[in-house]
Amino acid sequence: MTTVSMTLNGKKVSANVDDRTLLVQYIRETHGLTGTHVGCDTSQCGSCVVHVDGKAVKSCTMLAAQADGSHVTTVEGLANGTELHPVQAAFREHHGLQCGFCTPGMIMSAVDIISRHGADIDEKTIRHELEGNLCRCTGYQNIVKAIQAAAQEMHGAKVAAE
Amino acid sequence: MGVQGIGASARRKEDKRFITGQGKYTDDMVLPRMGFAAFVRSPHAHAKILGIDASAALDMPGVDSVLTGDQMIADEIGNLICGWMINSKDGSPMNMGAWRALEPETARYVGQAVAVVIADTQAQAKDAADAVVVDYEELPSVINAVAALQDGAPQLHPEASRNLIFDWEIGEKDATDAAFASAANVIKLDLTNNRLVPNPMEPRAALAEYNSAEEHFTLYTTSQNPHVARLVLSAFYNVAPEHKLRVIAPDVGGGFGSKIYIYPEEMVALWASKRTGRPVKWLCDRTEAFLTDAHGRDHHSHAELAVDADNRITGFRVSTIANIGAYMSLFSSCVPTYLYATLLSGQYDIPNIYCDVKAVYTNTTPVDAYRGAGRPEATYLVERMMETAAGELGISPADFRRKNFVRTFPHQTPVIMCYDAGDYDATLDAALKGIDYDGFPARKAEAARRGKLRGIGLSCYIEACGIAPSQAVGSLGAGVGLWESAEVRVNPIGTIEVLTGSHSHGQGHETTFAQLISERFGLDMDNVSIVHGDTDKVQFGMGTYGSRSGAVGMSAIVKALDKVEAKAKKIAAHLMEASDEDIQIEGGELKVVGTDKKLSFTEVALAAYTAHNLPEGMEPGLKEGAFYDPTNFTFPAGTYACEVEIDPDTGKTEIVRFVAADDFGKIINPMIVEGQVHGGLTQGIGQALLENAIYDDNGQLLTASFMDYCMPRADDLPDYELTTHETLCPGNPLGMKGCGEAGAIGSPPAVINAICNAVGDNSISMPATAEKVWQACRAQTQMAAE
């Protein structure tokens, strides 16, 4: 058993868990944050993407112990109170989700993609960047559209703030 | 959200919980004291089970119990069933072998469950499952359906001699043969429709709880049709009577057909919860999903088309061998028969059609309905044949299709279906215009200058949706009726709950269905809730598959709304001392026409529940239910046009443009319909280019993970261009036809026709992988050199 402590969606948490506990299990089972999903067992689908110290990580690929001391953000920690994150809002506005299962991972990946590429990210780059996230419902078209719209929205907000 | 009616692209009501991580899927449910199930599965495709030794597993930490098939039989749990009876040509009923949820004697495919471990944690259960020792005696296995029919092939079930489940036929054989005898031209084609794995992103899961005092079970599960699950679990599997079994399908992460069926694992979880006296949770991992979720397609067909001197089709005959896998899944028998061969007329006026279908057992995962279910197989055959025939006859594929289109309705085909409405010229025209068909030769020449191969392909699909009326499907062998139910409950303050037997697992029913109510009563969408997926809340329903929730499910809602509206008008007329006929509903108010008298919908609802002043003899309350049974299937149709560019040096196919022109009848929410088409097209393109379930000769599934089975990813796909053309379906009150499966049905032949056109080789099969296309390009180059 290992004691794993981290800042999870801004709150300090700690728990004594089996050594082999994956980060996704620590998030879902130990702390009951079920927004992060498990869609495969080979780190291919991306349903479990969270942010560890600001970077998108497949939480099924990492032991909870490896995230000890980190700041971890899940989809539940993305909105600012009742105000949706621009990526969340764009997924809804552009119908970037259907069954919703891949959606949390898609959104967490999208936030990371936008932070790395900025406002002018083109369709081709977005499609390439989504290679680690599978969706079986949408055909990706509206996900791509949502990410592009959110990138511009977030950039506009940044410019306005400056 | 405001008032949003038919035709509005209302943003989805359900999205907020999904984008904030508050969806509630089966795996998210937790119950006190729950144990976890892990299955012991056969590593062999075919083997006798000589013994099961659980002693080591039982000694491991956290293990509660190890259960086997013998105990299930002792508890009188029934075998899994196939719910659609098919008779062979000779009138004999299909030869169905026994399928037990935990097999005690003979394993017939890799992954078949033979025992289950229940333990305190999932990790403990999996560890212990590995420690259960099963003594197997390997038997010879057969994977390919054609091989399974041959003399000397390994036999799977004693009930099915030569592994033949049925040898079925449809159409007039003699008349069709006569058409071939007098044909000016006969075109022949052999095709394989590749085996697919559905892969919804949420793997299956179950959480079962048994209350011994009440003798009552609750099952949370990943189902597209919780009421059908309850019926089958009760009536056939003998788990519990219906009133002692509640099935809840909460948020479900996609289905595509694979979550229609009642599988061994969900049934075992229920039974084990009683056996162990604690709630039992089972979570399918992805490899288990590959091994045990019902697969799709897997047909081998030979087809022949008879054409007269004027290029009119006079006959079509088809012989198909369908691989059913090791057992007959719930609807496996109707997929290669009534959902397949009845669509062989396509969009064309074909006077003579004959098809025979042999359904065959093999040592593979059971095969059942997957998005489209039979209709993609028919469409692939018809539309590959149309393009092949046009090529052989030396006429334009578009002109050949146009020459043979059905243009008068209703149109009775020789294979049961009676097409009620359509305009196939309109969707063909739209697709040709959309893709600039006339400009293709110039684009091909331009690509050739860059060393690339361009190709264009069409597919004019038709499908049959709704899968009803009940009497008709009953006469064809269905074990259930295929109507739908709805209940509209108006609360005293005027908000509305609609209970539906349809189930949403991505389709957006909570929005689309609410739009009907919003339009009818002029109410804000926020005042309407759609309730589904719980057998304790909704009385009965047939669930969601076969693109039926709009045409059948919403029609039931319309019927219930008619009753609510009539009663509300009566109450309003009484309160305002007017005649019922003079009451008009507009903007959330009931008005007396030609006066300024009006009552809000809330005031009328409240009056119904206070019952202080109702018309003489009227019952209080405002709640109405309805069952809707369609009068016919519905027939969505359209044309897909695909243009590809191939790099002959790598064989890589790029879909340059994909234009879809669909006729879905009335569309309620265009945004949601477009999303359905995007997803369907992607699954069809996945089948055409990437996806293939491959077994080795020993029956090991080589493609049992996302590392090995190629799922379409964002950068494999184009930006689709969609148009719709509306001819109303005359068979239901809204004129809807259905849109959920069209993309997956129509797109594979469009892609393959385009690739064959580009390469100049008509033999390219699905999936057209880079390697396969590269080989074909190379062969063409060598032929040209010789």
Image (spheres, helix red, strand yellow):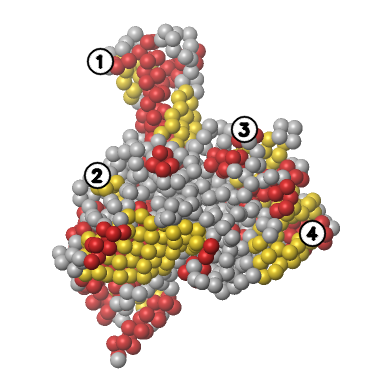
From this viewpoint, which residue is outermost toward the right?
B59
Q: Residue at x 40, y 81 (%)?
A: B775
Residue where numbered disc 2 is placed: B410
Find the distance from the CA under tag 1 to the CA under tag 2. Answer: 42 Å
Residue where numbered disc 4 is placed: B54
Which residue type carries mark 4? Ala
SS at circle 2: loop
Q: Nearer the viewer, residue B671 or B397?
A: B397
- Tell me if residue B240 can be seen: yes
Find the distance from the CA under tag 1 to the CA under tag 3. Answer: 51 Å
Rendered location of residue B140, percent (x, y): 61, 71
Bin the neighbour count of mark 2 within 10 Å (Cα to Cα): few under 14, some 14-19, many 20 and up. few
Residue where numbered disc 1 is placed: B594
Residue where numbered disc 3 is placed: B243
Find the distance from the CA under tag 3 to the CA under tag 4. Answer: 35 Å
Bin the neighbour count of mark 3 within 10 Å (Cα to Cα): few under 14, some 14-19, many 20 and up. few
